[in-house]
Amino acid sequence: MANLLQDIPAGDPLATPEKRAIIDRILEEGKSVPGAAMVVLNELQSQIGYISVPMQAYVAHKMRMPLAQVRGVVSFYSFFTTTPRGKHTAKFCLGTACYVGGAPALINKAQHELGIQVGQTTEDGQVTLEICRCIGACSQAPTVTVDKDIYGRVQANSLPQILGKYRTQAR
């Protein structure tokens, strides 16, 4: 853990005084709350946007808990991310109805359109591409969500328009 705290990359939030102050404030405010680890990590994800590996080590050190425990929480819950996300997150449902309805082809089309793979963010920082299991809109399969917007019965020829809308606007 000591190496992780000594070798902090220049772009990491811990290396930026303003962001480190936010991290320290969140740790101070959340350390005595019941379920402190989850509360702190949730707030860090919300305020910083992701929880880097050095941040995980820092949280473990400051909260006096094993690094494995912090990593376990971050890796278990899908809403935590260890790398920066784009301003918009496009998620492709791979539940049974969506899968059968053509979601794999939509994912391929999105990867081609955006020039990235699932789990990556476009170079302009606008869109992160992800998959999810089921959003509960099976009657609308295949479905794609972008941020809080849900698109149903999506076809490959309409996908560029959907994604293009988010590549030109800020969140």
Image (tube, grey):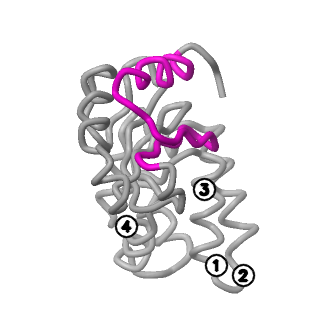
Whether residue 150 is in magenta: the answer is yes
Q: Are marks 3 and 1 in contact (CB under 8 Å)?
A: no
Name the mark nearer the viewer: 1 or 4: 4
Instruction: Please indicate whether residue 26 sits to the left or right of residue 41 in the image.
Output: right
Q: Are marks 2 and 1 in contact (CB under 8 Å)?
A: yes
Note whether 168 is above or below 131 in the view shown: above
**Which residue lies under the disc numbered 4?**
75
Q: CA distance from mark 2 to mark 3?
A: 16 Å
Left or right: 153 as drawn, with respect to 116: right
Question: Image point 55% across, 70% down: which residue?
Answer: 62
Tell me the amino acid under the disc marked 1.
Ala
Q: Which residue is mark 2?
A: 32
Of callouts 3 and 1, the N-terminal one? 1
Where is residue 79? Give x, y as percent.
50, 59
> How far apart in space, not on screen, are marks 2 and 4 (Cα)?
23 Å
What amino acid is at disc 2?
Ser
Tag 4 or tag 1, which sits nearer the N-term? 1
Q: Considering the numbered disc 1 on the image, is that residue within a helix, a strand or a loop?
A: helix
The residue where tag 1 is placed is 36
Residue 79 visible to the viewer = no
Magenta region: which residues? 141-167
Amino acid bearing label 3: Leu
Judged from the image, the secondary structure of the residue bearing numbered disc 4 is helix
The spot of residue 124 in percent (x, y) is 43, 17
Mark 4 or mark 2, which is nearer the start of the sequence?
A: 2
Dot 4 amino acid type: Ser
